Amino acid sequence: MTVQLSGVLSALATPFSADGAVDVARLRAVVDRNLEGGVHGVVACGSTGEFAALSNAERRLVVETVIEHTAGRVPVVAQTGAVSTAEAIELSRHAAAAGADVLMLVTPYYEALTARETAQYLKRVAGSVDIPIMLYNLPAATGFKLEPEFVGELAREVDNIRYIKDTTADLVQAGRLIHNHGDVISTFVGWDSLMLAALIEGAAGVMCGTANALAPQLVSVYNAIAAADLARAQAEWSRLFPVMDAIMSAPFIAAVKVAMQAVGFDAGVPREPFLDLDATARANIFALAAKL
């Protein structure tokens, strides 16, 4: 599929069975739920998908399952970044061969890299495949912030670097990417509670883990902005924001799975070392979701 990504991309949750294994049947249902909610693309093995708690074999299984079950209905983004260049190349080549439309690359997330090391890693991995690359700017985990000028220079040098997911919660950063480097790279904001502001600013789209629970509402806000109906977008966002804020204010992976339960879809609990939410946080998300 030749695509130009835009809109609401859902960072898919990864469900686990009672014995702790990846629940493939439930993962297919997660895909269906998101597509029925109208999302414009899905992301396998993102942070919401708990990729850091998966083995490489499990990451390949999740990517294969999502690509196969999506069956071309929307683009599939596979997150294939890793702590070593060789591992990221192996996962990237696998995902490309399996049929991913775009690869998302987080930079190594244990020992912070220098700018030169980060550029080398991204060039090497991007050069190992011939499909589009989305950079994943997650400095809270990686220790290295992909500054807009760094991103623009890299995108101008490497033909298949075409997107960035910016998860800095910094709208100044997003604005500089959108307005100063939009000729070479499309920006997706990866901080769910900034969705309205990011889209109004001109982002190509958003990548939201909350879409697993709230896809129809998020897509409706996106559609209102696309139709230049700002009043409707603001009104819908005002109703949606309290539950969004509650999810974002809690441990995020667990909160997304609780929100899914709150709207009638049980995706289980996170894989340890992540834990389920405490009773107070769970009750708050359930109460707010019930008001939608």
Image (cartoon, rainbow, N blue to C red):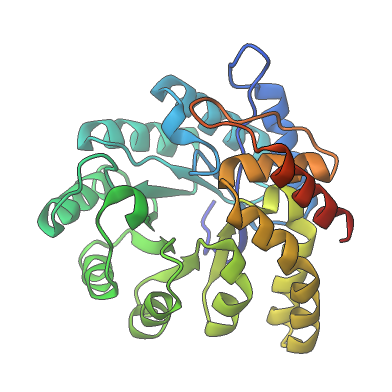
Q: Work out which residue is located at the far left of the displayed protein and give it.
A: 116
Residue 233 is situated, as x and y percent measured from the top left of the image, at: 75, 80
Q: Furthest-top residue in view?
A: 19
- Relative side of 141 to 40, left or right: left
Using the image as rendered, state which of residue 157 and residue 238 is in the foreground: 238
* Quadrant of residue 151 within the rendered picture: bottom left
Give the quarter of the image for residue 108.
Answer: top left
Residue at (57% x, 31% y) in the render: 275
Choose top left, top right, bottom left or bottom right for residue 174.
bottom left
- Residue 32 image position (x, y, % from top left): 75, 40
Residue 279 position in % (x across, y down): 73, 38
Q: Nearer the viewer, residue 245 or 10?
A: 245
Residue 38 shows up from this direction: no
- Position of residue 20 relative to residue 149, above or below, is above
Side (left or right) of 184 relative to 46: left
User: Can residue 104 be seen from the camera position used here?
Assistant: yes
Q: Nearer the viewer, residue 122 or 172?
A: 172
Give the image location of residue 263, x and y in percent.
83, 46
Q: Residue furthest right?
A: 291
| Residue visible at 77% across and 33% down in the picture | 266
Q: Is 36 above or below relative to 254?
A: below
In the figure, 191 relative to 201: above or below?
above
The residue shown at (55%, 26%) is 271
